[in-house]
Image (tube, helix red, strand yellow):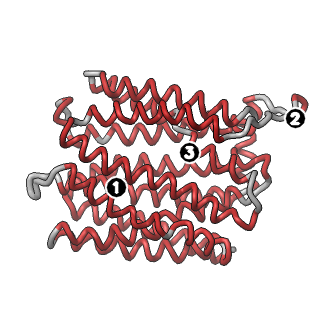
Amino acid sequence: MADSFGVSYGLVGLVPALNQVALALGVLFLLPLGDRMSNRRLAVMCIAIQVVALILMATVQDFRLFVAASSLLGFFTITPYLLPAYTSKRVPKERLGFVTALLTTGVIAGVQLSRVTSGAMGELLGWRSVYWMAGALMALSMLILPMLMDTDKPPEEADRDSYGQLMNSLITLAGKHPRVIVSGIIQGLGFSAFLSCWLGIGLHLTSAELNLGTDTVGYLAAFSAIGLLVTPRLGRWADRIGPERARLRVSTLNLLGILTLGLATVHWLFLLLPIAIMSTVGPMVDVTGRMTSLNTPPAARTRLMTLYITLMFIGGGMGSWTGTIAYGLGGWWGTVGLTSFYAALVCILSWHQARDR
């Protein structure tokens, strides 16, 4: 993509960085509407705009327009974060960890499948084909999702806040639920580690030093699907011991896995070890964090999820931007150092919250 638009690797890092920031803003300004209007209607409306944005990304020739379309896509990508709160109101409390893990597994499966297919498609058909395929899949989602969601009724008129009151309530909720805020910061740092790691892997494997194709990156992503086998089981485990204790344990294992990234300097196949560890326990940092948001009064869950996801994607934007900078300055060791730093902060904050709990 950088070569196609004639921009530097550092500048092309704006695409995922601004996409994540736009997503955080979209979650902040659109997701609270889930406590006020039909979730099904809100989801379909946002997906329709995503389809338009993806078509633009597949066709525009100017890098600035591409970044704008990518940011538009990010702003309206709220459906995966609307569904956990929607679902949590329809399951018993004792199954919350398992159901949250199941939804997270679905997201991860989509991410892993997209990496495999996009890596192969980018190598064989060019990077624009990826966005055509994404647009077609989102159009299909727009048709299927209304069949799966209830026609939930919005609150009664007397109980319905104005949009301004809805947004102002976020500040009040943040003060009442500090656990959710800390969990959002932890997940933001964890997401930073995840994105900076995979950006570094992509840049490292396709660099002049190794000269491997983007399809190799996709194959490594396919291997990371190993985590899909255990995430729902770990969700049940978190239901038993509590989200804070579970998060401390998995974040510690995740840090150990990230530290082994340095072995990739010997041979790129040594990436299999840290990828296996991170893919197995990494998603549970997110699952346990979401449990703190969804284990709250139903009327406020969507807005608390808004706070959590906003912090998560602010971290994601930071990880995308600093990840490309770290690789540009220090190569693979720059990626290892930055990713380890983020993972260590996750461990420290997880320990602090588990101790207080």
- Left or right, 72 with respect to 124, comes to right
Please, what secondary structure does the residue beneath circle 1 have?
helix
Above or below, comparing residue 193 to residue 16 in the picture: below
What number of labels is visible?
3
Above or below, comparing residue 284 to residue 140 in the picture: below
**Disc 1 designates what residue?**
196
Q: Nearer the viewer, residue 172 or 253?
A: 253
* Label 2 packing within 10 angstroms: few (<14), some (14-19), many (20+): few
* Label 1 packing within 10 angstroms: few (<14), some (14-19), many (20+): many
**Disc 2 designates what residue?**
159
Q: Position of residue 147 (x, y in %)?
A: 64, 37
Residue occupying image coordinates x 18% and y 66%: 268
Q: Quadrant of residue 163?
A: top right
Q: Nearer the viewer, residue 330 or 162?
A: 162
The span from disc 1 to disc 2 (Cα, nearest Å) is 43 Å
Q: Earlier in the sequence, mark 1 or mark 2?
A: 2
**Mark in front: 1 vs 2:** 2
Q: Quadrant of residue 254?
A: bottom left
Q: Quadrant of the N terminus?
A: top left
Q: Position of residue 328 (x, y in %)?
A: 21, 51
The span from disc 1 to disc 3 (Cα, nearest Å) is 22 Å
Q: Nearer the viewer, residue 87 or 290?
A: 87
**Disc 3 designates what residue?**
80
Q: Amino acid at mark 2?
A: Asp
- Left or right, 190 with respect to 265, comes to right
Q: Amino acid at mark 3?
A: Pro
* Label 3 packing within 10 angstroms: few (<14), some (14-19), many (20+): few
The span from disc 2 to disc 3 (Cα, nearest Å) is 26 Å
Please, what secondary structure does the residue beneath circle 2 have?
helix
**Mark in front: 2 vs 3:** 3
Q: Earlier in the sequence, mark 1 or mark 3?
A: 3
